[in-house]
Image (cartoon, rainbow, N blue to C red):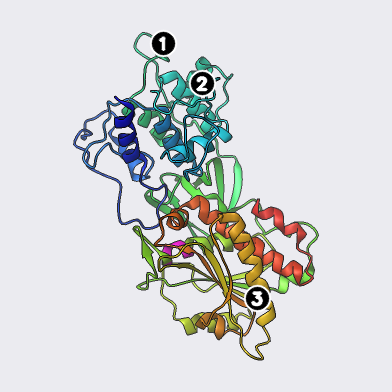
Amino acid sequence: MKKRAFLVLLSFLLAIPLFGVNNTAKAATNFADVGSTHRATKEIYYLTEGNIAKGVSPSSFGPNKKVSRGEAATFIGRTLQLNGTKRQTSFKDVGAGMVASGYIQSAAEKRILSGYADGTYRPYKEVSRGEMAIMISRAFGFSFDNTTSGAAKALVSRGIAQGKGDGSFGEGELITRADFSIFLARAINPKFRTISNTVSFKDARWINIDSLNVRTGPNDSFQKIGAVKQDQQVLSSHKIGAWSYIKYGSLEGYVHSSYLRDKAEASNAGNIDPRIAKQVVVLDPGHGGHDSGATGFGIYEKNVVLDTGLKVNNLFKQTPFQVKMTRSTDKFVELRDRVSYAKSVGANTFISIHANAGGGTGSETYYYSAYKNPNVADSKLLATKIQNRLVAAWNLADRGVKNGNFHVIRENTMPAVLVELGFIDRKADNDKLRSDYWRNAAAKAIYLGTLDYYKAKGYQVDGLYNIAK
């Protein structure tokens, strides 16, 4: 295939963003060339369900087409939730404009993929079975002796790959999209493997949220198969990106690792100011229920900010802070009820989380300034600390700290801020709002900014910064 034609095809395959939040566009579920009797049916549809692999057209998966190095980097990058933002790379033949550039660079930085001695990556070069074995072994942390035969053995011993009829692995043969899908799906989901009991559940973890969904794969596009209640102990086997594979009774699947903690009780994390235990932080994810908030490119503000808020909540739950949420599910809460809730629990700080709209770009944080309001200085300080962290973490335009006449910060009786993460109707901002990777970064920024605020107020919080690493 000519390079230009291949680039058009690759752009189609990789154009859909990584992990959407309530995307209106779903992965194709009825490829004409992948029927119920196809040898890779379950694996192909599993990967498309999780938005890891795409079809070559809306009705065709192209199972017999060969996989390129750029395509392989993207499939693996999506699986591991690597940063796929298009950018300059360390390879002279992968420019910032290439669709796969972000995943190629991220995978190279993690030593999952490598280039050639001449400084190229050769993104259009087709991948062999042996190269695939090395890529998957590195991506999933399988032990091998840095040889193709060692990588092949690592996959075969786990029931991920099988040898050829002649007894060899066929390491020099080019791999098709169907075979790559089979091997990648088996690496992700042990239930697809040809050998049972290939994972060991040995690490105890505890649930840090009211109810944690368990899914068939490592992102929120995969099917929910159950849930585990707060403070229940689960056993963890391994991680893929930000997701852990756990066992709870007969239930096995993936949960987001940010909602797990290592101890039965929350840790005080070192030398911490005892006054912290009396500080109540209220998190307020905007909108909810029938109020979707702003929308853009198939995602809803209410879902973006709820997921971000839950991630912030989990960070605070690992500290002596008392953390509360105005909503932790997809429900509608009146503005006045958000304020009254914060007052009723004796909140010391109030953080409302939103996504912007209207054609702009960047992050901004609001506080309410009014004559004789005793919280103006502290609200502005809190807003400034969070804004500084968010801009540094997201690298979007800094729209600054502003005075805003919003109900939830105007009517509250404690230091209160409203954070606008980014513009949901601007593509660059939206790519981050829909990404689990970047929502984690935003959550850490809000958490760290709040610590910065308390530190500036004279509290000893140094021991709590490591929680967000």
* Mark 2 neighbour class, 10 Å CA radius: few under 14, some 14 to 19, many 20 or more: many
| Relative to 261, residue 91 above or below | above
The secondary structure type at the circle numbered 2 is helix
Q: Tag 3: residue type?
A: Lys
Q: Which residues are magenta?
A: 302-306
Q: Residue at x 56, y 45 (%)?
A: 235
For the residues labelled 2 and 1, the Cα–Cα distance comes to 13 Å
Picture coordinates of residue 203, whole percent (x, y): 61, 43
| Relative to 75, residue 160 above or below | above
Residue bearing mark 1: 168
* Mark 3 neighbour class, 10 Å CA radius: few under 14, some 14 to 19, many 20 or more: many
The secondary structure type at the circle numbered 1 is loop
Q: Residue 380 — which label?
A: 3
Q: Earlier in the sequence, mark 2 or mark 1?
A: 2
Q: Residue at x 67, y 59 (%)?
A: 266
Q: Tag 2: residue type?
A: Ala
Prevailing SS of the magenta stretch: helix
Q: Earlier in the sequence, mark 2 or mark 3?
A: 2
Picture coordinates of residue 222, whole percent (x, y): 38, 48
Picture coordinates of residue 146, whole percent (x, y): 57, 19
Q: Nearer the viewer, residue 263 or 305?
A: 305
Horizontal side of 435 relative to 178 (left or right) equals: right
Quarter of the image where one finds residue 40: top left
Residue bearing mark 2: 151
Residue 49 belongs to magenta span: no
